[in-house]
Image (cartoon, rainbow, N blue to C red):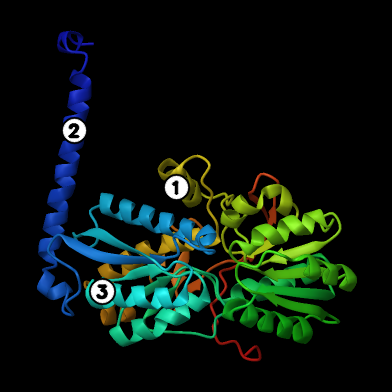
Amino acid sequence: MSDFDHRDPFSNHRRRLMQGLGGLLMAGMTSISVAQQFPTAKVNTTKLAVTDTEVVVGQLHSATGTMAISETGSIQAEQLAIDQINAMGGVLGRKIRVIKEDGASDWPTFAEKSKKLLINDRVAAVFGCWTSASRKAVLPIFEKENGMLYYPTFYEGLEQSKNVIYTGQEATQQILWGLDWVSKEKKAKTYFLVGSDYIWPRTSMKIARKHIEGHLAGSKVVGEEYYPLGHTNFNSLINKIKVAKPDVIFIAVVGGSNVSFYKQLKAAGVTAAKQTLLTISVTEDEVLGIGGENMAGFYASMKYFQSLDNANNKKFVEAFKAKYGAKAVIGDVTQAAYLGPWLWKATVEKAGSFDVDKIAAASKDIEFKGAPEGYVKIHENHHLWSKTRIGQAQADGQFKVVAESPDLIEPNPFPKGYQ
C-alpha cells in the first residue's frame, strides 16, 4: 500500500468511483456521437416518441388479475433487457424510456391501453400481451395505427401480421413435436385433452386432435374438456379422467387455475407414478404458485427451461436473480419476453430507423446469438426459428430437460391439414 493509500483508506474507493464515472461519461459521449450519426429527422419520420436522446416504448401486460401469475415474469424480463441495452448506450444512441400499462387480465382493457400507447404516447414499439385473447383484442389497433408489437407467448398460430413479431413458439413447433415425443417414448395411444376456455387452448387442442388422430398410428382422443379462466373446481374433470384412463393427459390450462388443478390432481391420487401428463402451458412461473411437489414427474413441452445448460442462459439467470431476487424463477414466456427488446434493438440498427414500416421490412433473418435458449432467428413470417424441448418437473420447481429437437424448427403458422 502506498503512503497515499495508507494516509487515506478511502482513496482507492474514490479512484474506483472516478474511474466508474469516467466510464459512464465515456458511454454518454459514445451515445451522443452515435445519435449524431443518426439524426432524429432521419430515424423518426412518422412522429414517434423519439428525441435526440430518448426513445419511448410501451409495456402492456397483466400486472393484476388471474393472468398476473404468468405475466409478471414477462414484465420483469423485458425491463431487464431494456436496462441492459441502456447500460450499453441504448438504441441508435438513445436511451429507452418505458411507459407501463396494466391490461388487468381483461381483453377490452388491453385494447384501450394499446390505443393510449400508440395514439397518445406515440411509442416506438410495444412489448406485451400474453393470452391470445389479449393479442386478438389489440391486433386491429396495431394494424390500424401501424404500431409494432413484440408478443412473447407460445400460441396457436394461424396468424401473421406485419405489425407483430412473435417471440414465442407457434403450435407446430411446440405441440406437434411434443406429441410425437410422448407417442414414441411413452407408447401412448389414448389422450384426454383439457384446456381453458378461450381461443388459444381450443385452437391448440383442435391441432392436437388432428395430429393424434391423423398422424399418430392407432391413437385416439378419449376426452376433451374446457373450463373458464379462473376456474378452481376440477373434481368432476378428474373423475372423468379416472374413468377414461388415458395414456396421456394433454393440458393447456392457463393462469391461476393451474394451482387448483394440479393440487386437486395430487389429492385425487393422480400423480406421475401412475399417469403421464404433458402440458403446453405450465412454466417455472406457474410452478411457483402450484408447488413443485404437485407437479413432480409431469412433463412440459417448451422451447426454454431455466435449467438449460449454456453460457447465454447462465448469464441471463444470474442477471435476472441479481435484479429480482435469488428465489426468482424464469419460465418459457419470460425468456421469450426477454428476446423482444434485443430483437427490436437489432432490427432498428439494421434498418437505421425507428419507423415501423422499415423495422417490419428489416426483421427477416435478424439473429440473436445471445438468446438464453441458445440462438434464435426471425423468419420472414415474423415468427422465430427455435428448438423444442421436453422438461420433466422436479420437486424443487425446476424442470429437467429430457429431450430436445436436434435442429431449429421452422415456424409454420398456417400448417396444411390442421386448420
The x and y percentages for residue 268 are 83, 57
Query: Which of the image's four quarters has the C terminus?
Result: bottom right
The foreground one among 40 and 240 is: 240
The foreground one among 35 and 99 is: 99
Left of 190 or right of it: where is 82? left
Left of 41 or right of it: where is 132? right
Q: Nearer the viewer, mark 1 or mark 2?
A: 1
Q: Quadrant of residue 358?
A: bottom left
The foreground one among 115 and 202 is: 115
Relative to residue 392, is residue 186 depicted above or below? below
**If you read the primary sequence from the N terminus, does the residue marked by circle 2 or circle 3 appear first?**
2
The x and y percentages for residue 26 are 15, 45
Badge 1 amino acid: Phe
Residue count near mark 2 (Cα–Cα under 10 Å), binned few <14, some 14–19, many ≥20 = few
Alpha carbon separation for disc pair 2 and 3: 35 Å
**If you read the primary sequence from the N terminus, does the residue marked by circle 1 or circle 2 appear first?**
2
Q: Secondary structure at mark 1?
A: helix
Label ID, residue 320 = 1
Q: Tell me if label 2 and label 3 are in contact, CB under 8 Å.
A: no
Alpha carbon separation for disc pair 1 and 2: 26 Å
Label ID, residue 364 = none
Query: Which of the image's four quarters has the N terminus?
Result: top left
Residue count near mark 3 (Cα–Cα under 10 Å), binned few <14, some 14–19, many ≥20 = some
Which residue is identified by label 3?
Answer: 351
Badge 2 amino acid: Gln
Residue drawn at (49%, 59%) of the image = 334
Q: Secondary structure at mark 3?
A: helix
Left of 243 or right of it: where is 199? left
